[in-house]
Image (cartoon, grey):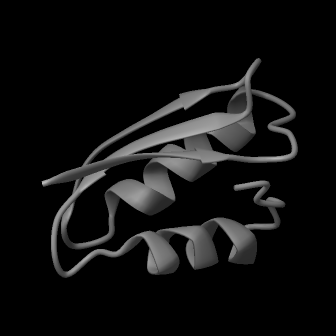
Amino acid sequence: MESQTIYLRKIDNKQDKLQIERTLSQIIGVNHVSVEIEKAQVFIEFETPASLNNLEKDLYDLGFEILY
């Protein structure tokens, strides 16, 4: 299992937080998603077939700008 933190430009509100958690949690291989609104960070625990590139793409598709 792999753990990663993805840093976003911003997370505006609790609705964005819930949207991120709901979307990423539905991906096969994702075990845990936690979002910190104030720091604009997404903590993810995942394993194959999920990958960091796919998770970042899904965040981008939701309209979030990824810093690193």
Splitting the image into 4 quarters, where does residue 50 fall?
bottom left
Left or right, 2 with respect to 11, comes to left
Q: Quadrant of the C terminus?
A: bottom right
* Relative vertical location of residue 39 with respect to residue 9 in this rendering, above or below: above
Between 39 and 59, which is closer to the camera in this rendering? 39
Q: Quadrant of the N terminus?
A: bottom left
Residue 42 coordinates in the image, percent (x, y): 55, 40
Q: How many numbered marks are there? A: 0
Left or right, 64 with respect to 48, comes to right
Residue 54 coordinates in the image, percent (x, y): 47, 80
Left or right, 11 with respect to 36, comes to right
* Relative vertical location of residue 62 with respect to residue 22 in this rendering, above or below: below
* Relative vertical location of residue 6 with respect to residue 48 in this rendering, above or below: above
Between 11 and 7, which is closer to the camera in this rendering? 7
Splitting the image into 4 quarters, where does residue 41 fall?
top right
| Residue at 58%, 50% in the rendered image | 20
* Relative vertical location of residue 7 with respect to residue 52 in this rendering, above or below: above
| Residue at 71%, 77% in the rendered image | 61
Left or right, 13 with respect to 56, comes to right
| Residue at 61%, 78% in the rendered image | 57
